[in-house]
Each structure stands twice: as C-alpha cells, then as structure tokens.
Amino acid sequence: MTREVVWDHGVSLPTHRLWLDPLVVRSFAFISHAHTDHARRHKEALLTPQTLALIPESRRPRGWRMLGYREPMRRGDGNVTLYPAGHMLGSAQLLFEHDGTSLLYTGDIKLRQAGGALPTFVPKADVLIVETTYGRPHFRFGDPDSTVEAIAMWCRRALDSRVTPVLLCHALGKTEEMMLALAPYGFTFALEKRCVPCAREYATAGRPLPEWVELDGEAPRGCVVIAPPAGKDEVRRLGRYRTALVSGWAKDAEFSRMFGADATFDLSDHCDFDELMEVVERSGADQVYTVHGYTADFARHLRKKGIKASALEATEQLALAL
Ligand SMILES: [Zn+2]
C-alpha cells in the first residue's frame, strides 16, 4: 500500500480511490457519521446502517454500501473494516489494510464513555488520520460520569425552585445521548423543535429514548428542556429558566461567553487533548495526519514527542463542533 494521503475537499487515498468524509460529491466515499458536515449525496457511500438511518432523506447518498462494525469488506485489493468511534450512534473509524500496511481514519472520535461503558477501542495502524477538534492542551474534560451527575443535580435544583432547566446541546447526537445519560435520574424532557426530528431518527435507528414532548411555548412543568445552543427564541418565552451549555467548548472562556449560558458543563462527544494523545499512542502509528480544529497545534505537540506528524488541511477552518 502506498502511504500517500492528501487533502482535497476531504481526506483522500488517491492510489486506492478512497475518499473519507469528502466535502464534495464523490463516486465512492466513506461517511463516518451523520453530522451535517460529513453527509453528502455521493454516488455510492460506505456507512453503518445506523448512520444511514440518521441522515435525512434530502442529504442521503444516491447509493450506499452498508457495513456493520468489525465486518471486513474487500475494496480493490485491500480490506476495509469499521470500528465504533464512540462519537454518536453509528459513528465509525475506518481501518484500511493493504499489502501488510494499515491506515486508520478516526472520523469524529470519543474514547471515554459515560454510564460505565468500555472506552472506545482503537485498532493498531501504521498511518493514523485523527480529528483534532480539541487539539489544544487547555481542552481537558472531567470524568463523563461525574459531569452527568453534576448536570442532573443542576437540573434538579432548578426544578425544585420552579425554574425551567434548559440544556443547550447539539440537536443530533448530544441531545439524545444527554437524555439517555439523564434517564436514570427520572427526568422527563421537552425538546425544542430543531431537536425533534433528530430524536425521532435516533429511535428509528434503533436507540429508544426516554419519554419526551415537543416544546410548545409554555414552560413545561417538571421537564428538562433541551435546545440547540444557537438561536434561543423559543427558550426566551419560557419565563423563569436557567441555561447550561453542554459542550467541550465550555473549556474555552471566549466561546462560552458567546452563548451567554448561566452554567457550562464540559461533556463532549469528542476527545479532549489527553484522549487525542491516547488515540495516537494506542494506534501505535509512526505517521500521523491531523484534520479538523487545531490541526497544526496538535501536530506540533506530537512532533515534540518525536512522532512524525503534520496537519493535512492546507487552510485550516475551525469547525465549532458542539
Ligand atoms: Zn460529528
């Protein structure tokens, strides 16, 4: 296998005609998960059944090849295997093996999982392409279980004083995972309208959610409200409410201020700086490429540790993945 990896509107292995999360329509491409920045109407897409179920009709690829986790698939004269990425329902890492050489593309990845689940498995590879959304050392997140507990207590305190708790979460993935994590505390939920289709899709894709209603203007009695962080018109109609931003960006004072939340919790569906280092270590790769977020910074930190690393994107665009 040639180790050639290039950036051309997405990650490309040119000698194997394989595109990984390309930003433009391609003939054959891997879609790592269902977030909008990754799904395009490719001629043929490789994805997990859950990812396909979570992509709305209007953004679905025209053709697809569904592949479950750990089911090897031939691609040309190489082998492709998908592994869970721990980022959201259906999210996958892709391992490509050819001629004794292997390459791992993480897509969006999260190692530590709440609820006592095992940390995400990282396969061994010679070459690693890793996402670096939080690739700066000030992004160090607390233990997910303790953070969920703190969020639950914050919600309970608000409800006890007849104030509506509003959690600001990305509509697809974070909202649903938040509901599942808080379910053991016995809350019921009211979802802002932009979270509603995503919650329905999650249930269709095979992960049933705790009881919820759609937010309809009134302050829902005894409910935890979940809404996307941007555009809070519906939230403002609630009267007495308190907001909390649930995101890795909680660790960035400037970003947190932008959303004007009353509280912040650093629960993320991405790796923090230390987890990213752990991904690199566990892969055992001797060549690392970084994509998304702080690509240049993280590559520099790796080089300081003696690891061959470079940022793949020529022009860096900071994607605010919530
Ligand atoms: Zn994502």
Image: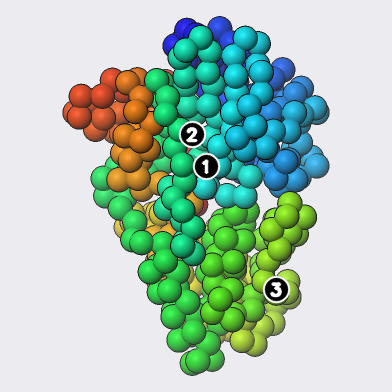
Residue 157, picture quadrant? bottom left
Please say whether residue 257 is visible from this viewpoint: no
* Secondary structure under the numbered disc 3 in the rendered image: strand
Q: Earlier in the sequence, mark 3 or mark 2?
A: 2
Q: Nearer the viewer, residue 64 or 199?
A: 64
Within 10 Å of disc 1 (Cα), the crowding (few <14, some 14-19, many 20+) is many
Mark 1: amino acid: Ala
Within 10 Å of disc 2 (Cα), the crowding (few <14, some 14-19, many 20+) is many
Residue farthest toward the bottom in the current orientation of the protein: 161
Q: Nearer the viewer, residue 206 or 311?
A: 206
Q: Position of residue 153 (x, y in %)?
A: 44, 80
Q: Residue at x 75, y 28 (%)?
A: 65
Q: Is residue 218 left or right of residue 129?
A: right
* Secondary structure under the numbered disc 2 in the rendered image: loop
Q: Earlier in the sequence, mark 3 or mark 1?
A: 1
Numbered badge on residue 106: 2
Q: Residue at x 54, y 79 (%)?
A: 185
Determine the CA span between mark 2 and mark 1.
7 Å
User: Above or below — where is 313 with respect to 142?
Assistant: above
Pointer 1 residue: 85
Determine the CA span between mark 3 and mark 2.
32 Å
- Residues under numbered marks 2 and 1 in contact, where contact means CB atoms less than 8 Å apart: yes
Q: Position of residue 58 (x, y in %)?
A: 79, 40
Determine the CA span between mark 3 and mark 1.
27 Å
